[in-house]
Image: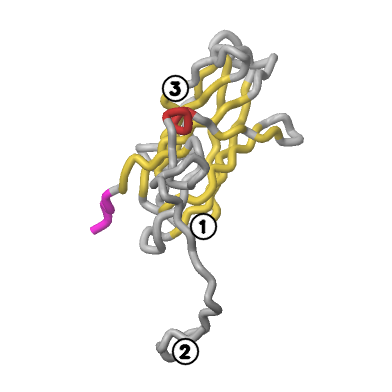
Amino acid sequence: MATGRKGSTSKGGSVRFPDDEGAEGSPVHRNDKAKEQAIPALLEPDGNFLVKVGFLRAQHRYEIIFTLPEVPTLGKDVCSLPSNSSPTPRPLLKVNRSPPLPEGGVKVTCEYTTRQEGVLQEELTLVSRGKKEQRLRVRLQARVMERHHGTPMLLEGVRCLGAEKDKRK
């Protein structure tokens, strides 16, 4: 089918949009439950966990919510250790809350600040409040794209909190 434009290769296909904007099942439809959903943590062979948060944008802050299954050695009342490995006074990844879930496990809400693009991994350590010697390492893995390359579609459990101001002069 020719459209009269030079170089057009259209074959006459059509695109249909749903009549109801934001219909159920549509990527733009987000109900209240979607805001509370969390990313599941994947158990690694060494007994620690990996959380894949998908695509993020450089120089932005994100709230990431993930769930850990019940770990008997850790218990239900967990907290995070402060990150000593961060060279900056403000860590890139910090845990805001980690309440136990009624069905077992822990729901962890953290804040992650991206600085550069690429496949990045940040680590946090969770400990039981009663047993400080029991530790669990959680690695967050993200693909961070340059801030001028568009807006990534975020996974359920990831929410953008805003852009970081560039402090370099």
Please state which amino acid type lies under the numbered disc 2.
Gly
Considering the numbered disc 3 on the image, is that residue within a helix, a strand or a loop? strand
Label disc, if present, on residue 7 of the rendered structure? 2
Q: Residue at x 71, y 36 (%)?
A: 44
Mark sitting on residue 39:
none
Label 1: how many residues lie within 10 Å, few (<14), some (14-19) or many (20+)? some
* The stretch drawn in magenta includes residue 120: no
Q: Earlier in the sequence, mark 3 or mark 2?
A: 2
Query: Observer-nearest residue: 124 or 34?
Result: 34
Closer to the camera: disc 3 or disc 2? 2
Q: Residue at x 61, y 19 (%)?
A: 105
Region of the chain picked out in magenta, as a range: 165-169
**Closer to the observer: label 1 or label 2?**
2
Q: Which mark is residue 118?
A: 1
Looking at the image, residue 88 lies above or below residue 17: above
Real-space Cα separation, disc 3 to disc 1, in angstroms: 27 Å
Sooner in the amino-acid sequence: mark 3 or mark 1: 3
Q: Which quarter shows the C terminus?
A: bottom left
Q: Measured from the top left, where is residue 53 in percent x and y?
A: 54, 43
Q: From the viewer's perspective, is 73 left or right of 97?
A: right
Residue for point 40% across, 51% down: 115
- Mark 3: give few (<14), some (14-19) or many (20+) Cα within 10 Å: some
Query: Do the residues bearing badges 3 and 1 touch, measured as CB atoms within 8 Å?
Result: no
Q: Which three-letter amino acid code belongs to the residue tagged 3?
A: Arg
Q: Which disc is residue 97 wearing?
A: 3
Quadrant in which residue 23 is drawn: top left
Residue 4 vertical placement versus 68 (above, below): below
Measure the alpha-carbon separation of dots 1 and 2.
36 Å
The image position of residue 33, as x and y in percent, is 47, 28
- List the single residue furthest toward the left: 169
Query: Which amino acid type is shown beneath numbered disc 1?
Result: Gly
